[in-house]
Amino acid sequence: MNSAPGDLLLETRGLTLRFGAINAADNIDFTLRQGEHLAVIGANGAGKTTFINICTGYIKPSSGTVLFAGRDITLKGPRQIARLGVGRSFQLPQLFLEHTVQECLQLASVARDRKISRWIPLAQNANGTAVAEMLELVELTPYRNEPAAALPEGRRKLLDVAIALMLEPRLMIMDEPTSGVASEDKHAVMRTIMAALRQRNVTSWFVEHDVDIVLAYATRVAAWIDGRVAADGAPEAVFSDPAIRREVLGER
Ligand SMILES: Nc1ncnc2c1ncn2[C@@H]1O[C@H](COP(=O)(O)OP(=O)(O)OP(=O)(O)O)[C@@H](O)[C@H]1O
């Protein structure tokens, strides 16, 4: 599909979901354009993950629509949405823990190519070149024979992103890519992730609580309050808004 930086990639119209008395998504109109790297900020319970879950098919809204590349994906399931080009990484990485790093990527490769087989060895069915390139891209080549379970948290996050990237998404949604990562490693992990995304021309949207990380890697920031987008724009503009500093960053 032909597309250019600035083209509309994802759009929600009137997206709404209530959990009892809680407005987890309150009539959200939102757009994301090709080439953007959006950070979503907001206090705990503001609805950031709910919005991701709706846009990736894990839960259905009570009303409203989600369009991806102009196509209505509101009622599609997570696998269909992933195949259409929306990758996702999780707050707690979803890895095949007993497998090695390389095997995790081989599994992603055979899943992508629909070549899962009980009879043919994984390494034979996987695209070895794509796996080797991905290991290099996320700087995990030296760890390729380690079990995923043995990786420190930062490298687990990289592997989680790499598995999603094997599906060649156009958009990568990451829920707190640096949470649980040692503070001295956060920038290195984020630098590697963002360099990989840029190299593959993948637009991104990530939830992040660390202001330094947001300022260093986001081209745009959206602040969530009570299931609504309370501010949306250039990082410096959003962070200089006193209401956002108070409500989202907890400043007095
Ligand atoms: N399955 C559910 N059932 C009932 N309430 C839910 C459910 N999922 C989320 N909520 C509520 O919806 C609101 C939004 O939750 P959500 O997890 O989306 O917030 P969040 O901004 O991602 O928070 P955090 O930063 O803690 O991850 C919260 O009040 C939460 O308790």
Image (cartoon, rainbow, N blue to C red):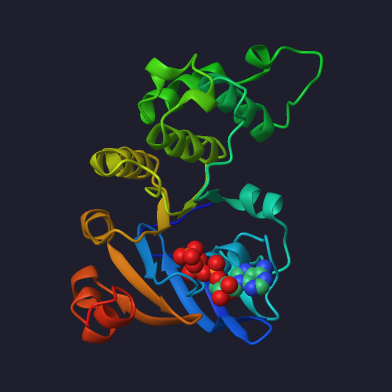
Which percent across, then down, holds residue 17?
Answer: 64, 80
Query: Quick check: can you spot residue 10?
Result: no
Q: Is residue 121 left or right of residue 82?
A: right
Q: Is residue 5 left or right of residue 10?
A: left
Which percent across, then down, holds residue 136?
Answer: 38, 23
Quadrant that contains the C terminus:
bottom left
Q: Quarter-wise, where is residue 21 in the image?
A: bottom right
Which percent across, then down, holds residue 138?
Answer: 38, 31
Q: Quarter-wise, where is residue 31 in the image?
A: bottom left
Labels in figure, total: 0
Query: Quick check: can you spot residue 112?
Result: yes
99 is higher (above) or lower (below) than 114: above
225 is higher (above) or lower (below) than 192: below
Give me the residue at 66% from left, 12% from top. Answer: 124
169 is higher (above) or lower (below) than 35: above
Which percent across, then down, holds residue 248?
Answer: 33, 76
Q: Is residue 14 left or right of residue 244?
A: right
Quarter, ligand 1? bottom right
211 is higher (above) or lower (below) than 188: below
Farthest right residue? 119
Give me the residue at 21% from left, 57% from top. Answer: 212
Q: Nearer the viewer, residue 251 or 230?
A: 251
Q: Nearer the viewer, residue 225 or 203?
A: 225
Q: Nearer the viewer, residue 14 or 160?
A: 160
Farthest front residue? 252
Q: Quarter-wise, where is residue 218 in the image?
A: bottom left
Give me the residue at 70% from left, 80% from top. Answer: 62
